[in-house]
Amino acid sequence: MKKVLSLLLIGVFALGLTGCVQIEDDPYEVDCDEYPNHVSCLEDGGGAIEGAPGIINVLDALPDEPITITFWHVYGESKGALLDEFIAEFEADYPNVTVEAVSQGDYDTIRSNTLNAITAGTTPTMVVGYPDHVAGYLKGNAVIPLDDFIYDENWGVDLDDFIESYLAENKQYAGGYMYSFPYSKSTEMMVYNKDKFAAAGITVPQDEIITWDMLDTWADTLVNENYVPGSNVADECQYLINFDSASNFFINSVRMWDGGYTNSDGEILVDNQNTIDMLEYVDARFEDHTFSLPLAWNESYGSNNFIAGDVCMSVGSTAGINYNIPPGGEFDVGVLPVPQYDLDSKSAVQQGPNVAIMSNTTDAERLASWLLIQYLTKAENTAAWAMETGYLPVRHSGVQSADYQAFLEIDDPTDSLYYSSLAAQAAYAQYEYFEYDPAFAGAVTSSDARFEAGVAMEALFGGYSAQEVIDDMVRQLGA
């Protein structure tokens, strides 16, 4: 059985099949005499403090005159209100600092707006974003390395207290400098309809990793390919498991199968037998309705169809756990780590934005911004942010705080934080195999690669073959 692909996606993919995008070699070169602090030109300045490169001037004291910093983020009403609370507390500690926090809506918009602001010379003081965003900003000499602040005797932080993989993600830029700092981190988790599994007589193990073989077996019992969406049959589903992010599904699956994706040099490594084998396996599971994407219902996420009972399980961000909970308690929801192909090459995506300080700023604005980053990420605040938003603390001391440990032990389904607690528990169960994407910017960017990975997986769902989607991905990325 072939799937039906949305007309928009068919148009995008067919364009790639009929004529590849012409991508020229990256013409980008930096005049280091004009831009000595550009990432391509930096050399360790031999700062007086061990670890500090001596690149950025760090003031000994915050000036007394009024300082205004603008902070661009992506948070909506609820998360934005909590951020505003933290900012108000920070401003009370530093009365001469005013923080103007402005939501830019979503990640694509904040990236686009920031790139436009770089061109216009009107950047904010601070900006939230993913590593691939920061890699692009670096091309315009638009963000500063934070290492001189991190290691400063007055203003520094203990990096040993921060989650190691979060630091590694932010150290991946040229020279190993930290052009961004961990802020709102998350991963993916799996929700499942406990009532449907119980009705079908299936026990979902709670103390072992779910494998794709288990999913195959469960699909034989639970999946009815003729299931009518919205009918909510007690022990059946139209699809067994949905994956909200087609890009994450592609990238994570490649890692599980020891295939190739990209590297920090911007090489596109998807055309290999392991990746083809993975896609052919996934394609067979698309065909028999074991796996699905939101595209099956012309949705952006699978949460509505999970709540409707059309799919028995769904993989999505820990930060979005509450979107998967039926508002009237129509069924019980279980939360577990993301299923793995096998136990030899486990992988879970490390996601969520970091925060950077822009170059078009004064020394005073930079110090005030760094102090705000410190305030937002101190143990009690990173823990509070995590508990209220579904993100994860960025510091070990935040995880180990009494409040967060109590949060992880919530076992009352009527508690408003119950499902966020379950999502966090699932996240920490896969902490040891978090993986982050290499970030690069050039004629082809890591954002481009990620986008094409999602297109490839959706095209596979739409009926194209594994080799066709890989060939098109390679063409689109000029590889």
Image (cartoon, rainbow, N blue to C red):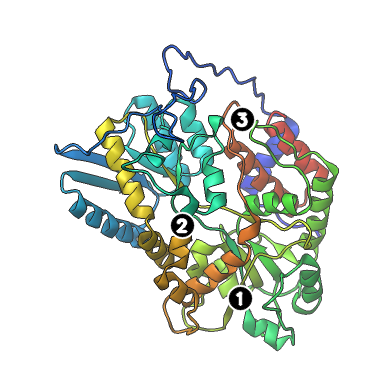
Looking at the rendering, in which quadrant would you find the C terminus?
top right
Secondary element at tag 2? loop
Residue at (70, 72) in percent of width and height? 238
Secondary element at tag 1? loop
Closer to the eye: label 1 or 2 = 2
Residue 306 appears in which quarter of the rendering?
bottom right
Residue 404 picture location, percent across and down: 44, 70
Viewer-closest of 179 and 445: 179
State the CA–CA distance, disc 3 to disc 2.
33 Å
State the CA–CA distance, disc 1 to disc 3.
42 Å
Q: Is residue 201 above or below residue 450?
A: below
Q: Is residue 396 above or below residue 98?
A: below
Residue at (49, 26) in percent of width and height? 39
| Disc ID at residue 395 | 2
| Disc ID at residue 230 | 1
| Disc ID at residue 444 | 3
Residue at (71, 42) in percent of width and height? 261
Residue 201 picture location, percent across and down: 74, 87
Residue at (56, 67) in percent of width and height? 303
Closer to the eye: label 1 or 3 = 3
Q: Is residue 71 visible?
A: no
State the CA–CA distance, disc 1 to disc 2.
43 Å
Residue 169 appears in which quarter of the rendering?
top right
Q: Amino acid at mark 1?
A: Gly
Closer to the eye: label 3 or 2 = 2
